[in-house]
Amino acid sequence: MGLFSFFKKSGSKKLEEAEKAAASAAADAEAVRQQKIKALYDEVNEYGLDVKDLKIDLNDDTVIVEGEVEKQSTKELLVLTLGNIDG
């Protein structure tokens, strides 16, 4: 075969476009994730649950909840509140 040399700035921009699309999709996915987390916080606040140092995170479809409650019933209500949200 032989050695070929190409100009760096010429040719198709398909890889660059695909890279930009992937970055945009990742940014959109993170924005959606943050909106979902905010909605979960809003749902907890709507019920007026007393949770100290509440932290909510999402890992795909799994909700990760951290915090401290004084009563077992508050913990159960928190888990049920977050578990009964579609999406």
Image: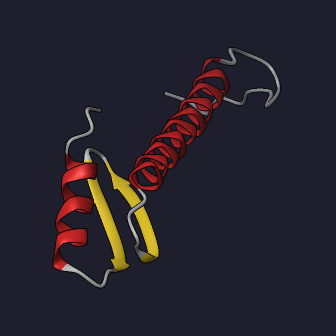
29 left or right, relative to 19? left
Which sits in the foreground, 34 or 69? 69
Which sits in the foreground, 54 or 46? 46
The C terminus sits in image quarter: top left
Q: Residue at x 17, y 65 (%)?
A: 76
Q: Residue at x 18, y 53 (%)?
A: 80
The scheme the figure's colours follow is secondary structure
61 left or right, relative to 2? left
Numbered marks: total = 0
Task: Determine whether 73 is above or below 85 in the image.
Answer: below
Which sits in the foreground, 64 or 70? 70
Q: Residue at x 53, y 38 (%)?
A: 26
Quadrant of residue 44 in the image? bottom left
Residue 82 in the image, given as x and y percentages of width and height: 28, 51
Residue 37 in the image, given as x and y percentages of width and height: 46, 49
Task: Determine whether 63 is above or below 52 in the image.
Answer: above
Quadrant of residue 70 in the image? bottom left
Residue 58 in the image, given as x and y percentages of width and height: 36, 53
Task: Determine whether 71 is above or below 86 in the image.
Answer: below
83 left or right, relative to 68? left
Q: Residue at x 32, y 67 (%)?
A: 65
Quadrant of residue 4 in the image? top right
